[in-house]
Image: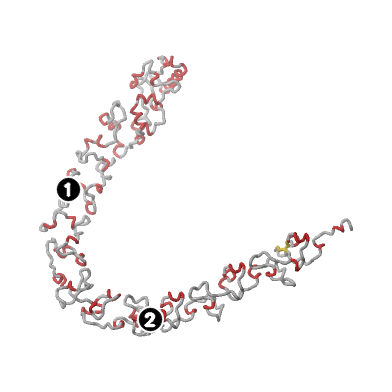
Amino acid sequence: MHLPRARVAALVRFAALWLCLLGPGLASAQFLSPGPVAKEHHEVDGDDDCHRCHEQGEGVPDRLCLDCHRPIQARMNRGSGYHARVTKTERCAKCHEEHLGRDGRLVRWPGGAPERFNHLQAGWPLTGGHQDTKCRDCHKAEYRQEGNLPDQTWLGLPTDCAICHKGDDPHKGQFGNRKCETCHVTEKWKALEKFDHAKTKFPLREKHADVKCEECHEKGKYAGVTTTCVGCHETPHPKATDFGEKCERCHTEKAWNALTYARAEHKKFPLEGGHAKPKCTDCHGAKAVVAPPKDCVECHKKDDAHKGQFGRKCQSCHQISDWHTLKKGAAIDHDKTAFPLRGEHVGVDCAECHKDARFKPVAHEKCLDCHKDPHDGAVGQKCEDCHVVDGFRPSLYPLEKHTRFTLTGAHRAVACNDCHRPKPRTPAVDKVAHGHGEHPLDFRKGVNACSGCHKDVHDGQFAPRTCDTCHTTQGWVGGAFKHDVWPLTGKHATTACASCHPAGNFAGVSRECRDCHGDPHLGQFIAGPPVKNCTTCHTTDAWKGRFDHTSIWPLEGVHAKAECAACHKEVHVGDARVTVRWRLGFHDCARCHENVHRKGKP
């Protein structure tokens, strides 16, 4: 007779309780057993076997289960598998219930069935084609690599592809022990998404990257494929036996015509300068088997600008690097002429001076023979007085010659054209400017007054005084001005100029204290005679006063210790302002003290 699972579980708990209460003497009594164990545990179904799974006060402890199920214990110890990852903290009896009869199931699958089990919890998620595979197609005894396991167990299955797919291996063991997932993915066997050809002996670059796999790997052959160019490509140089089989010496994978022949290997005719630019076929023909002549004229006859007047040995004067640059120490050495080339003249194209490729002497005694005068004759004919062949700018005009306006201080670093402005535009000036590229500067008429270059930031406040009264050429700030008109003492000596001279207002500034500091006494000392200035009581060293009380009311006796505020109290003015009344206007005692002699009298 089969009992409902809930009732059986209740009987198990009831029996376990009585076993604990009655003690080991009665624990083996067969009449307390809730029912027979599953056939897998039949060997522990005797009257005296209860203690092998049960323990007084603990029920069914996990350690007794793991004493028998040692493969599970081993997996938990090394942290692998479902029991170590998910159920390590759960009791075995939660998923494996007993005493449900000989045919009772010992495994309660999460989700109710093996097909609903989340394989990620076992540490090996099912992806791609594995998701549609039946459980027992993989969990077979023939695939297990661990012994001492029952046939129906789910344990012991490896994750190596070759164990299950050994019969599907199209490579027939070409790759040895390399793992299948190095190249393949579970979504599709032929999708080589993970394979990185760059890690092989033949990385795929440029044009090779577009070639289909089967064009090189015929009939599934992947190991031992040739990596030489001639193994796949037919040489286009059948007569050029000197080239050998190393195509990579000249060609690249980018394109067959992208040649990279090393210049150093072109020993019979070194490829230098301009000879390194032409294509191989320009000299060697389409099949690269033609030996070109070594005479320059044979190849460059049409480029001879001299029409043969200097013979055939072009290399006597010209360099290979640049046809237009003469060779140093050539037959025509400009250093041996009346005009050695120096400075900027070295880089001038020969045709600039030697027109029509005629190398007869040209005028060269004066700079103006070749160069237009940017000063329009204003400074004479000797350009070398100010300029050198190393460069037209900067001018080397010596400062000591600048006598009409001596250059001192910061003026020594000012560029010439900051003071010497362009001449007024006229047709004659425009003609010179057009030939030289800019309008000539007026060097005969410079600027002498400060105002000619510098804006008067004081807007004429100090006229007719000149700028050098206060400023020097060493620097605009920190000039020679002395505050003798109103000496700065005390705190005034460290006050910023702008505090008293706002907005650059220097002339006509008031010298009255109250105009800057205000009058906290609200006119008490100027309202009537005698008028007192701020300096009567205050100094520039500090605001706190120095008033001498003896001149008005000597402080004697108790008065000498009295606080000022005891007599000089705050008063409210009509416009809601408050001030201390310093001028009391009386000297009699009765104004401050009560007459004690009049107490009690009418």
Amino acid type at circle 1 is Thr
Q: Position of residue 327 (x, y in %)?
A: 21, 72
* Viewport quadrant of the N terminus: top left
Instruction: Where is residue 513? Give x, y as percent.
Output: 65, 70
| Residue 501 left/right relative to 365 | right
- Vertical placement of 93 versus 484: above or below? above
Q: Left or right: where does residue 600 sit relative to residue 59?
A: right
Label 2 crowd (10 A; few <14 / some 14-19 / many >=20): many
Residue 55, visible in the rendered structure? yes
Task: Give the camera-side residue of 407 and 197.
Answer: 407
Q: CA distance from mark 1 to mark 2?
A: 75 Å
Tag 2 residue: 440
Q: Which colouring convention does the figure follow? A: secondary structure
User: The residue under label 2 is which amino acid type?
Assistant: Pro
Task: Name the residue tied to disc 1.
Answer: 226
Q: Is residue 227 left or right of residue 59?
A: left
Location of the C terminus by quadrant is bottom right
Q: Find numbered disc 2 in the image and state the secondary structure of the residue it sits on.
A: loop
**Can you tell which quarter of the image residue 542 is in?**
bottom right
